[in-house]
Image (cartoon, helix red, strand yellow):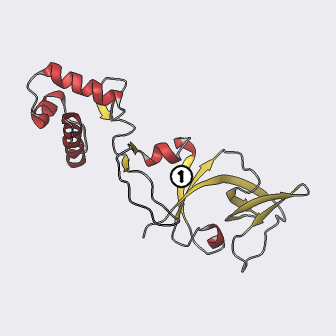
Amino acid sequence: MTKLSNSFKKIQSFYDQKKRMPSYSEMAKLTGVSSKNAVYKMVERLCGLDLISKDETGRLIPGKSFQGVRLLGYVEAGFPSPAEEELSDTMSMDEYLIDNKEATFMLKVKGDSMIGAGIMPGDMVLVERGREARDGDIVIAEIDHGWTMKYLHRRNGKIILMPANPKYLPILPKEELKIAAVVKAVVRKY
């Protein structure tokens, strides 16, 4: 482990415990660095890696990759192959999944009409408002004063909401249909 990554782990640990970033003098104590110039250079390197950032007043704040999850490589989903583990990068789930943070939210799934799409009761779906829904997208829709999650299909100029479970019938709006959001991801906890 490099000295920089070891120092960063200590900064992360401090942040996890105190719920704030350490000051420059606290950083010096944490990392065993005695000179303010060395702490400044370390902070600049961490800023360059998006691990630490500065707000508009110059205060240190967590960067985009501060709480990222390590990306170790690939896993074979077909025939078994030798495991190859290498730290290729870290990634933030927000950075990976969210394009527009202000328009993105999570919903907990209730019901089984989308199990054929791999969306089970109790799963969480990450959805984005304001995104144009295309044919085949899974959408959150208000239809005839009720809410549902279904595939959006356009046929002969009409919109049909299709379930992913043969127990349910397609839904055609009788009065009105508003597409509120498009599903971007499904999160399941085992």
Percent position of residue 161, x then y: 76, 64
- The quadrant of the image that shows the N terminus is top left
Outermost residue on the top side: it is 37
Outermost residue on the bottom side: it is 167
Q: Nearer the viewer, residue 6 or 23?
A: 6
Secondary element type, mark 1: strand
What amino acid type is highlighted by mark number 1? Phe
Percent position of residue 122, x then y: 51, 71
Q: Residue at x 19, y 37 (%)?
A: 7
The residue that label 1 is drawn on is 105
Outermost residue on the front side: it is 82
Q: Residue at x 12, y 37 (%)?
A: 30
Name above or below for residue 125 compared with residue 110: above
The reply to whether residue 44 is visible in this rendering is yes
Disc 1: CA contacts within 10 A as few (<14), some (14-19) or many (>=20): some
Query: How many labels sit on residues?
Result: 1
Name above or below for residue 180 compared with residue 147: above
Q: Residue at x 57, y 44 (%)?
A: 103
170 horizontally vs 25: left or right: right
The reply to whether residue 59 is visible in this rendering is no
Q: Nearer the viewer, residue 105 or 151?
A: 151
Q: Residue at x 44, y 62 (%)?
A: 81
Quadrant hosting residue 15: top left
92 horizontally vs 169: left or right: left
67 horizontally vs 171: left or right: left
- The quadrant of the image that shows the C terminus is bottom left
Name above or below for residue 99 compared with residue 81: above
Percent position of residue 133, x then y: 72, 50
12 horizontally vs 75: left or right: left
Percent position of residue 151, x then y: 72, 62
Quadrant hosting residue 34: top left
Q: Nearer the viewer, residue 85 or 166?
A: 85
